[in-house]
Amino acid sequence: MSILDPNEQQAAETAEVKTGYDALPVGKYACQLTEMHKHTNAVGNISLKNVWRIADGQKYAGRLFYNYASLKPEYIGRVRGIYEAIGAPLSAEESEVIGRAAWVHVGVKADTRSDHMGDFENKVKFVAKYDGAPLPSYISPNAAAGDDSDLDDMFGPAEGGSEEDLV
């Protein structure tokens, strides 16, 4: 069976080809965590990989930000900061944190890859406890596909705040 249904295939055939996204403006975005696990880079350094998705109902909904928090002793405080921002204990498993909300503060930096000179990309500067309007529940793609490994009832943000803060 084709991944795209016939209507999606037809739309894609006539769409302008796009291969990436422009960097979003500097600011804070109401996001939900979609992925969090240990990651080892090419030189063997271990970090905590976090993938943040701008929450539905927000400007730029669905866009992703990636950040890697080093697990080296001198940087472990950043890892603690992420757990505190999402209101999770350090002993939490990935399934217990997926869907949790945080303000993700992003900057913009030049992309230094030789084939991307002149382009800009977003960089997560830090995450902070979410205090905005309640966000829609996030359902991971695994849960939407019927995988029971994710929690059915995700933890929501605290009530209160204002949508005026949303980018």
Image (cartoon, rainbow, N blue to C red):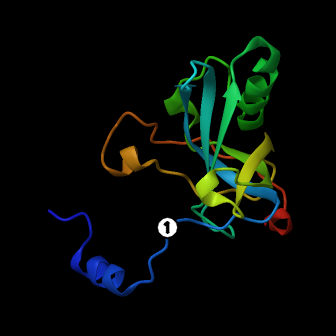
**In the picture shown, does residue 11 fall above or below 130?**
below
SS for dot 1 = loop
Q: Quadrant of the N terminus?
A: bottom left
**In the picture shown, does residue 99 fall above or below 70?**
below
Q: Nearer the viewer, residue 79 or 156?
A: 79
| Residue 103 visible to an observer of this rendering | no
Q: Nearer the viewer, residue 26 or 131?
A: 26
Q: Quadrant of the C terminus?
A: bottom right
Direction from residue 47 to residue 14 in the image, left or right:
left
The residue at 38%/45% (across/down) is 143
* Residue at numbered disc 1: 19
The residue at 77%/30% (across/down) is 84
Label 1 CA crowd tier, 10 Å (few <14, some 14–19, many 20+): few
Q: What amino acid does circle 1 point to?
A: Thr
Q: Nearer the viewer, residue 6 or 119?
A: 119
Q: Residue 150, how many percent across, how many down?
A: 43, 37
